[in-house]
Image: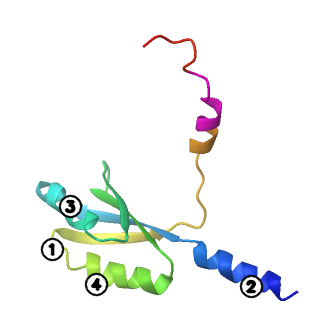
Amino acid sequence: MHLLPQALVVQRRKRLITAIILCAVDRRHIPETTQALLAVPEVSEVYSVAGDWDIVAMVRVREHEHLAEVVTQKLAPIETIQRTTTLIAFRAYSNYDLERVFSVGADEGRKA
């Protein structure tokens, strides 16, 4: 019975916390801000977006404490970011796997 808790601990260590950081930026500085964000190792993706926010950065870390360090010590010093809102993802849903499965063989019979 000791193995089950150990297995759960190992499984939890492998999970990443995904944070979605919404950034308001002076629109003239979007290119350099995206590059500054991409220079942060914990930032996996950066998107320029339309709407109330200018940039969305995806951050992946193993612990909430590490996320706090990333936001306050690595992102906050980026001077072109005027304000942020951080969202924590509880669960990820994706059509990607289903699309990949259903697209197998879809190109058969097509000529290049």
Quarter of the rendering containing residue 109: top right
Looking at the rendered structure, the secondary structure element under dot 4 is: helix
Residue carrying label 3: 35
Tally the marks. 4
Say whether disc 1 or disc 2 marks the residue closer to the N-terminus: 2
Q: Mark 1 points at which residue?
A: 79
Q: What stretch of residues is rendered in magenta?
A: 99-106
| Residue named by callout 2 | 6
102, 47: nearer the viewer = 102
For marks 2 and 4 on the same chain, the one whose residue lies earlier in the sequence: 2
* Residue at x 58% of width, y 58% of height: 92
> Spatial distance from mark 4 to mark 1, Cα to Cα?
12 Å
Query: In the image, is residue 105 part of the stretch drawn in magenta?
Result: yes
Residue situated in front as seen by the camera: 42 or 92: 42
Q: Residues within 10 Å of mark 4 (few under 14, many from 20)?
A: few
Residue under label 4: 73
Type of amino acid at the residue the image marks with label 3: Gln
| Residue at the image position 81 percent from the left and 81 percent from the top | 4
Query: Which structural element holds mark 3?
Result: helix
Quarter holding residue 15: bottom right
Q: Horizontally, is 70 left or right of 60 in the view?
A: left
- Tell me which residue sits at (53%, 66%) in the image: 89
Q: Is residue 5 visible?
A: yes
Marks 3 and 1: which is nearer the front?
3
Badge 3 vs badge 2, beta-carbon distance below 8 Å:
no
Contact flag, marks 3 and 4 (Cβ < 8 Å): no
Q: Where is residue 21 in the image (x, y as percent from the top left)?
A: 37, 67
Inspect the image, locate mark 4, and give the three-letter code of the amino acid beneath it. Answer: Gln
